Image (cartoon, grey):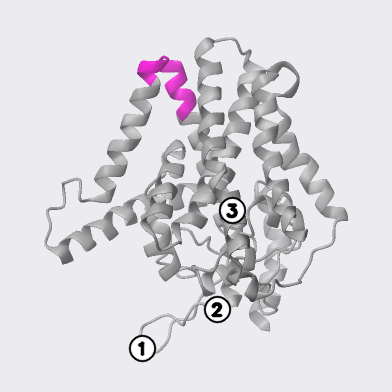
Amino acid sequence: MKDLKYLLAYILPLSTILGLYYPAKWAWFTVILIFGILPVLELFMPASTQNPHVLEEDSRSKRIFFTGLLYLNFPLLYGIVGAYLYRVGQNTLDQFEYLGLTLGVGIVVGACGINVAHELGHRKDRFNQTLSKWMLLPALYQHFFIEHNRGHHKNVATPLDPATARYGENLYAFWVRSILNSWLHAWKLEFGRLRELQVSLWTFKNAMVRFTFFNAAYLMAVFFLFNLHTMWAAVAVATVGILLLETVNYLEHYGLKRQKLESGHFEPVQASHSWNSNHELGRIFLYELTRHSDHHYKSSRKYQILRHLDESPQLPFGYPTSLIISLVPPLWFALMHPLLHKTQNQ
């Protein structure tokens, strides 16, 4: 029965569907849920360090259940984004409703889109990897598949990784640096792969060329199906989803560094190079992304069997609360710098 807790994750897309159907009353419900209700609830709910039994992965029925939970996000994602674009295209929303729904649908694009795509993208088979890429499309962030899997996991907690926030770097500066450099590094990685294969760089064999084409085709399809205003709305929800992802990136590795060895290489990735949170609601809504150290230890480990590791530094709050605090840099620094110093002195 405890596995059924992950069904609570569907409260997020359902809250957005409610807002799309009844915007006059519920347009802001998703925003209130994620940045109001969840942080308050997490203050009163204990964090759990209990680990799953690894043999759970051997159960076929469990594998089907846990993977099915991820797959259901695909129709929900595209259905919600499609309904939102239709609403905007009909021009029936006032500015307050439009803003609330844009933020809410953007949260879905980040949580049900990019986050689930991240989980599927680490799986080795073509079907899951293809599904991952399609789930990144509404965020216009398909290059994440390249940079995250081939760049971030190799370079995490080093100056080479755009997605690792540096000590004293505020969230807004991090957004600019991470978004720009992650995109550029994805191109660099793909060029390097094609040069090794001795293949032309500027063909559809270049995944970055394909992703750029798909992003442009998606936006043009929205434009021709609706209008220019709706196309910009598609860009807006993508932007919200991207900023949600990058804010989570900011939390996950803020200020943590791998030491450079005498050989010139960095030390192996350890549990101490990722911030974790065991707060239950954040874990459920993000499919255990908050147990990030174990994810970096073995990126192919399925979300339902990610473990708490005693040596990993712990955020004092869950992800929803931490997201809010990070928006206020002086407050974030005051909270995190003493924890960083304590972690580094252990």
Q: Which residue is mark 1?
A: 263
Q: Is residue 210 left or right of residue 195?
A: right
The local crowd at label 1, few if under 14, some if 14 to 19, many if 20 or more residues have their Cα within 10 Å, is few
Is any atom of residue 124 visible in this view? Answer: yes
The image shows residue 158 at horizontal and vertical percentages of: 45, 70
* Residue shown at the point (84%, 62%) measured from the top left: 46
Q: Is residue 217 above or below residue 90?
A: below
Is any atom of residue 254 visible in this view? Answer: no
Q: Is residue 59 above or below residue 89?
A: below
How far, Cα to Cα, is label 3 from label 2?
A: 19 Å
Name which of mark 1 and mark 3 comes first in the sequence.
3
Q: Which residue is mark 2?
A: 270
- Given this view, does label 1 or label 2 mark the residue nearer the observer? 2
Q: Does the segment drawn in magenta span residue 93?
A: no
Q: Which residues are magenta?
A: 223-234
* Residue shown at the point (42%, 80%) measured from the top left: 266
* Residue shown at the point (59%, 10%) measured from the top left: 92
The image shows residue 110 at horizontal and vertical percentages of: 55, 43
Quarter location, residue 3: bottom right
Q: Is residue 294 left or right of residue 339?
A: left
The local crowd at label 3, few if under 14, some if 14 to 19, many if 20 or more residues have their Cα within 10 Å, is many
The image shows residue 322 at horizontal and vertical percentages of: 70, 53
Instruction: Name the kind of residue labelled 3 in the image.
Output: Val
Q: Is residue 124 left or right of residue 94?
A: left
Residue with the most extreme right position: 44
Q: Is residue 195 above or below residue 130?
A: below
Name which of mark 3 and mark 2 comes first in the sequence.
3
Instruction: Name the kind of residue labelled 2 in the image.
Output: Gln
Q: Which residue is more in the foreground, 140 or 4?
A: 4
Q: Which residue is mark 3?
A: 248
How far, Cα to Cα, is label 1 from label 2?
A: 18 Å
